[in-house]
Image: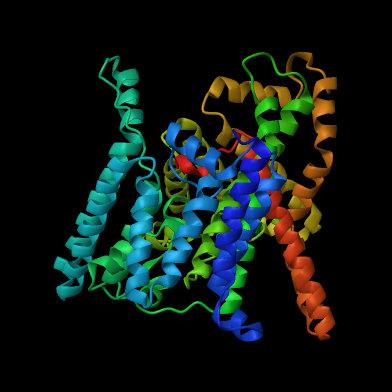
Amino acid sequence: MKDKDELLTAKAMTLSSARRQFMFNKASGASAFLTDAPILWQNALINFLYIMYFAVEKKTFLWYNTCIYVIKDRESLVFSDIFFLYVFLPLFLICYFAARNTKLKNAVLIVFSLFFYAWGEPVWVGLLIFSSVFDFLNGRFIDKHKDEKIAVLGVIVSCAVNLSILGVFKYSGMIVDGINTLLSLSLPVPDFHLPIGISFYTFQSITYVVDVYRKKARAQKNYFGYLLYLSMFFQLVAGPIVRYNTVAREIENRSVKIHEFSDGITRLIFGLGKKVLIANSMGQLATQFLTFDTAPTSVLAAWSGVILYSLQIYYDFSGYSDMAIGLGLMCGFHFPENFEHPYISASATDFWRRWHISLGTFFRDYMYIPLGGNRKHQLLNIAIVWFCTGLWHGASWNFIMWGLYFGVLLVIEKTFLLKVLEKVPKIIGHIYLLIAVIFGWMIFYFTDTSKMGACFGAMFGKNGLAATDLLTESQLKGSLWLIIAAIIICMPVYKGISAFGEKLAKKSAASFTLVSAVKMLFLAFILFASTVSLVGDTYNPFLYFRF
């Protein structure tokens, strides 16, 4: 019977053989780098796995444990998952770059996307396929009929069907429960398991048919081209909400440039670090401070919990968006930015130009402007849009309260507050915005209004609550440097460092080599630390997954 060290060495030797096969190529030097970037990335992944066998505790076999975990407790795939990172993604990249033309690449992407979607919930693939067939045919119908009255009928039917499907799965329980409460009935409350990504791909379907009607996009003639647009696993689960005309040309013909592939890897790893190293850490602390099954421990605990949750939700969602954009770049797609450092804003209006940009622009272009926009009933239009924005996030009254809360803030700013903020020092606007957002995320966090009230009271020392407590102080001190780093990274620091690095790299060949080496080491550290964290920690939620 071989001991663990011998088994470990044998496994590593197997990987080493695979590694040597990927390294073999006739090209060499700069030529190899320019022509074989995908192979180099595959090689890098396998080299990393080779190292990980020795870096992680000897008793842990990464792939073995991953496969056992997946078989025993199969859940929907997310990017911050060991199985996705070290099994699904390498296999996908190998198959994708082995495909010789765009049609074959599209076929590979569709197969892997449907597999990705079906992994945790196979039954909902049928719903995704139905939605794609229905809206593909609707797009053809709208494009074919030049009579506007007939074409608009196609838009109405498409929107009605898509929103009805979303309503049944997402809101039927809330509606029936409300009817029971209002009329003192006891109707059975539906409890559908929400299909993953339905809120995102429903909105993408709507943008497609509306844009075809508005002549802003040409109807897709090939069903599989439309299926690819709707099912692409990069942004299927949590956005960004990508409009069809953004990727229409790339669906038909695209190429992967070496610098974009490199940027994609950087974006993917950086997003992974934001999600795993920062968001998860902030979330664990926030959960401890915001658990109000017993009385809140102190004012400090309440404020710390809400602030840490504000950091968690930003890094959680923006990290996932970064990974989606990075994966797209690696395969030749260019998705829109979804976050632009929202916490540096000095007003709620500016904040919502920077936070979940693709959702904000969807509601602006497909609801706010058609309702009249700034031309008529502006304040009413804002209220309607923000009611729907809150409702989009979930079938719970706290999300509606959250949407209306920001709707009221935006109405106040439109009415007079923006003019006031323009006249005062910008720091006052920043403070106002941060306080407003913190209270907004408190509403967003608690589905139980009694706990929401308890948190609000605790933040202001209700019933003589102590200002601080030793346990909270100890927990904050233990994570102080990470919290400080999270606050700093919220600001455009990385862009400044990146710009400085690019400027330095242009000075000489030695400078270029130095900057490249530092960047690679930094990314390797993030990937390594994120992997170790995922292997050793069971806390890995994704907040926007439920929306």
260 displayed left or right of 289: left
326 displayed left or right of 478: left
- Residue at the extreme front of the image, as rendered: 1
Above or below residue 251? Residue 295 is: above
Q: Please provide percent x and percent y for residue 287.
A: 65, 29
Total count of labels: 0
The residue shown at (80%, 54%) is: 427
91 displayed left or right of 305: left
Q: Please provide percent x and percent y for residue 172.
A: 30, 32
Residue 500 at least partly seen: no
The residue shown at (61%, 48%) is: 10
Q: Tell me where residue 519 sits by quadrant.
A: bottom right
Looking at the figure, which quarter contains the N terminus? top right
Residue 323 at least partly seen: yes
Q: Nearest the camera: 211 or 54? A: 54
The residue shown at (43%, 53%) is: 381
Q: Please provide percent x and percent y for residue 317.
A: 57, 49
Looking at the figure, which quarter contains the C terminus? top left
Q: Please provide percent x and percent y for residue 274.
A: 66, 51
Above or below residue 225? Residue 502 is: below
Q: Nearest the camera: 189 or 13? A: 13
Q: Nearest the camera: 454 or 274? A: 274
Q: Nearest the camera: 410 or 38? A: 38
Above or below residue 497? Residue 509 is: below
